């Protein structure tokens, strides 16, 4: 039996209006693979998704699937369209979808009307490991970079993240740096240390220092997205929409802030980056204490390490140089904890 929310409107009304109870929500399904989208044909899994949508939402509707993204082997994201309706379905190979569905339900119920919005979870099928959620249109934050108001949008993104962090923390043990190293970094830094013995000392020094610093902190756990960056953000109806809740948990909020700062440093043009970081932090700290600023360098280091391991995993052009570059950035972030956040180190 599928897990479903308890809406005050019918499922079809939810899809058409993007509502869960009285709150406008929706999934901004703009995922592509290498800049393209794909139509799914003759695929049993996609047919299963369409059948589940007919069962739970509208028995009379023929849903046409279109593959939006695929992360082998963990997840496929599919847009299902019908006259006047669109839904996004996610296929999982494990129970992550159930976790994401529960997280989205909880956050939706807690948010009310705010600057932060997220997809409306429609139902989850444990048998098929299939999550269905609303689809709405919106402007990807990446496409807003050419706007004269980009810093304003980033300030709003900071306020949206602060809104998430101000919600009650999940009633689960907080994730620690050790958990983040295991959950978020693939492969684990230990794998790189084993395969590149000449860098073992550097890698172990970076991870050991992060673990040591954590023992000196007194962070209050907060809800964490754990993959907060520009490609997860969309702007619509005056709100910042945050997608992809697979990694949701609780822990030190400096993780999300540090991750986003590093993303801005590594993805924006040099001249635009300082004001972008400043705008994001101004939005975030507009309603929160700045006590976590002292912890940001360590979490920036963790993100640099995450990027190094990602380049090692993908092994694309010049990957060895990029791995070494991000190791060096992680080390510098830890060595210079009081350095300006607005410097592309």
Image (tube, rainbow, N blue to C red):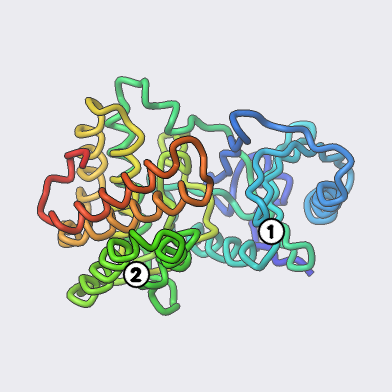
Q: Is residue 301 left or right of residue 51?
A: left
Q: Quadrant of the C terminus?
A: top left
- Of the numbered discs 1 and 2, the one sitting upstream in the chain is 1
- Which residue corresponds to the image point at 20% horizontal and 32% vertical from the top-left? 275
- Which residue is label 1 attached to? 92
Indicate which disc residue 177 carries.
2
Q: Position of residue 323 (x, y in %)?
A: 38, 47
Counting from the top left corner in percent of width and height, residue 247 is at 50, 61
* Within-10-Å neighbours for mark 2: few <14, some 14–19, many 20+: many
**Residue 228: x %, y % from top left:** 41, 50
Return the residue nearer the eye: 208 or 142: 208
Identify the residue at image location x=17%, y=40%: 342
Quarter holding the N terminus? bottom right
- Which residue appears at 58% of the width and 35% of the height? 30
Label 1, label 2: how many angstroms apart (C-alpha)? 26 Å
Q: Where is 185 relative to 270, above or below?
A: below
């Amino acid at each position: 039996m599928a897990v479903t929310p308890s809406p005050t409107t019918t499922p079809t009304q939810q899809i058409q209006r993007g509502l869960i109870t009285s709150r406008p929500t929706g999934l901004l399904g703009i995922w592509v693979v290498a800049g393209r989208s794909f139509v799914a044909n003759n695929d049993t899994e996609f047919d299963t998704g369409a059948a589940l949508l007919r069962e739970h939402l509208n028995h009379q509707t023929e849903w046409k699937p279109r593959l939006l993204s695929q992360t082998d082997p963990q997840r496929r994201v599919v847009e299902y369209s019908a006259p006047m309706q669109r839904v996004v379905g996610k296929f999982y190979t494990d129970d992550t979808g159930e976790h994401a569905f529960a997280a989205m339900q909880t956050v939706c119920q807690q948010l009310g009307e705010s600057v932060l919005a997220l997809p409306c979870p429609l139902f989850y099928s444990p048998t098929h490991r299939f999550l269905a959620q609303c689809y709405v249109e919106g402007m990807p934050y990446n496409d807003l970079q050419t706007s004269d108001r980009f810093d304003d949008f980033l300030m709003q993104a900071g306020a949206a993240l602060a809104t998430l962090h101000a919600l009650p923390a999940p009633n689960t043990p907080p994730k620690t740096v050790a958990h983040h190293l295991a959950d978020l970094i693939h492969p684990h830094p230990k794998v790189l240390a084993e395969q590149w013995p000449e860098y073992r000392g550097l890698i172990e020094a970076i991870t050991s220092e992060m673990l040591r610093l954590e023992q000196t902190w007194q962070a209050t756990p907060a809800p964490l997205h754990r993959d907060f960056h520009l490609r997860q953000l969309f702007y619509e109806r005056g709100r910042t929409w945050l997608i992809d809740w697979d990694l949701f948990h609780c822990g030190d909020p400096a993780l999300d802030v540090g991750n986003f700062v590093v993303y801005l440093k590594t993805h924006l043009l040099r001249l635009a980056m300082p004001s972008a970081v400043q705008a994001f932090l101004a939005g975030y700290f507009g309603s929160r204490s700045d006590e976590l600023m002292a912890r940001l360098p360590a979490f920036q280091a963790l993100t640099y390490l995450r990027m190094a391991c990602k380049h090692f995993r993908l092994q694309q052009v010049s990957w060895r140089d990029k791995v070494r570059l991000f190791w060096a950035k992680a080390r510098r972030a830890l060595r210079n904890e009081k350095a300006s956040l607005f410097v592309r180190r």
